[in-house]
Amino acid sequence: MQVDRVSITNKASKLVEELKNRHGEVIFHQSGGCCDGSAPMLLPKDDFYLDESDIHMGNVAGVDFYMNQAQYEYWKHTHLTVDVIKGRGSSFSLEIPEGYRFKIDSRLFTEEEQKHLST
Amino acid sequence: MSHSKPKFQEKYGNFIGGEFVPPKSGEYFDNTSPTDGKFIAKYPRSNKDDVNAAIDAAKAAENEWSKTSATERSMILNKIADIIEENLDEFAAMDTYDNGKPIRETTMADTPLAVDHFRYFAGAIRAQEGSASELNTNSVSLIIKEPLGVVAQIVPWNFPLLMFTWKVAPALATGNCIVIKPAEQTPSSVTLFAEKVKDVLPAGVLNIVHGFGPEAGKPLASSPRVDKVAFTGETTTGQMIMQYASKNLNPVTMELGGKSPNIFFNSVMDKDDAFLDKCIEGAVMFALNQGEVCTCPSRMLIQEDIYEEFIEKVIARTESIVQGDPYDMKTQLGAQASEDQFDKILSYIKTGKEEGAEVLTGGEQFQASGDYKDGFYLKPTILKGHNKMRVFQEEIFGPVVSVCTFKDEAEAIEIANDTLYGLGAGVWTRDGHQLYQIPRAIKAGRVWVNCYHDYPAHAPFGGYKMSGFGRENHLMMLDHYQQSKNMLISYDKNKLGFF
């Protein structure tokens, strides 16, 4: 048994596919606080500088999902599901012009799942 | 005084070179109100062509504007302040409809503060001086302040007119030209601002480009033709803007998130008096502006020996908050700014409960009635838990506070600083030693002592740690928008003798 840290809903996955067709390779980066924060950002792959301070948490809909190490320390006991909702945001995330926002739903990992985490 | 929904045109343009112009692509987006879910107006869905036109206009105005005297600019800023003040009700009504915040706040806080900020910087720029040093008998060093040139600014939706003012007033005072992108959720009051001041400001000095982050924000922040980027928003976008600025070796200021602790020491309960009443109000400040403030006191730390008595009063005060019609002056809590924010807040409450947090009050939607039944309203919520929970660590940006207890000063400081952020904090005590020592030990840019959520123009505001850097407000802001020209002058007629 292997347990993933991140998954994605069908609806969100479909939107990711559309955005990949339009923008090429993309990544998810989980943002921190403020107005449009605490939401996953879908960014052109080469636009965002990634290094060892970004934890690779998995791959959803063919897209790598990252989170800042310091933030990860507070999030790592929870499983994340990328979903999508109608909405607006002021960030640079690629779905915003389409009238959608990606969002995260979280749940606690069970003890059993904690033992089998993939990353 | 009656307050009602403002009137809107069907669509608006960008404000470039002193006039309203349609977006070059001809594309618009619909802006809707979170108070009732209804359509407000169409605003330009701008792209890099519009951004470039705005930068062209700013560049064209730069030479003349940068040479204006401090007196002239000060007079213009004072005129702008007067115009906002004369139209205060109209500005307030617009921000309420666009953002969802109650009319009480836009009338008594957002708009008067915007007026005062323009007046503050009108005064500050006239009082500013360069400096002169005699380096030796024959050499004098002069430091003269000069504008940066054209500055790019990206502002958020939580205080539409006020956040615009925080960025625009000091940049204008110091003689810069501006290209600014307001948040797409709240483009209205900024547009009204341009309508009202267009005869006061020379064409091209202030340019407003509406649109979305990836389409309009990115070309603005990454342009090699701007001389500074100022941003308020979340961390990932902040990091991207810094990357772009690094390519252009541009200065940036970043006002990012927070998870501000609000600490109540046991002495607050020593008496049942006016001060205790103030402390309870201070604890309930998490609900101000629907919690949509970067400095929202979203972690409440209460000394354990007063916890039961104190939280009982806080819950009672929270439950007495008046919700409903945002245009009623009695309403204290309005709508969340958008459906996605509303959904995110509920999702956090659910995560908090799963992590074991106890809901002391609220925790669910508030069903408004009548015209506002389709708006995004939440009950103010208090969660009890511990500081390692995600609801204690992440900015929820809603009327939600996470409360925990502490034993002594050392534990209070430890919990307060156990966060990625360092924007605001509150310390409440009757002890004169604590009111100095505790704030000094907290790693945050603004520590309110026996008060909270006060934003005077004369006090610097900004973050430590992942809350960003640079300050807003206060005359130190002038430096953020200025170069220091050093003229090194020799009065000596004789050569050095080297060559």
Image (tube, rainbow, N blue to C red):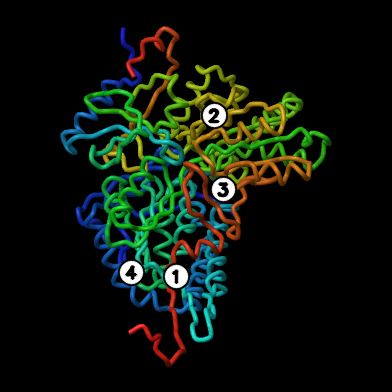
Q: Which residue is mark 1?
A: B484
Q: In the picture, residue B189 is in which quadrant?
A: bottom left
Secondary structure beneath disc 3?
A: loop
Q: Which residue is mark 3?
A: B445
For label 4, the crowd category at 10 Å Cα-Cα, with few meaning under 14, some 14 to 19 and many 20 or more, is: many
Q: Position of residue A88 (x, y in %)?
A: 35, 39
* Spot occupied by residue A38 in the image (x, y as percentages of width and height): 42, 33
Check chain identity for marks 3 and 2: say if they share one: yes
**Relative to B483, residue B419 above or below:** above
Distance between the alpha carbons at the discs numbered 3 and 2: 19 Å
The residue furthest bottom is B493
Check the image and report above or below for A6 versus B87: above
Amino acid bearing label 2: Phe
Between marks 1 and 4 in the image, the one whose residue lies nearer the viewer: 1
Say what secondary structure mark 2 lies in.
Answer: helix
> Looking at the image, is mark 1 or mark 4 earlier in the sequence?
4
Instruction: Give the residue pinned by disc 2.
Output: B392
**Mark 1 surroundings within 10 Å by alpha-carbon count, few (fewer than 14), some (14 through 19), many (20 or more):** some
Res B23 label: none
| Point 48% across, 21% down: residue | B350
User: Are discs 1 and 2 both within one chain?
Assistant: yes
Counting residues from the start of the chain, the first of labels 3 and 4 encountered is: 4
Q: CA distance from mark 4 to mark 2?
A: 45 Å
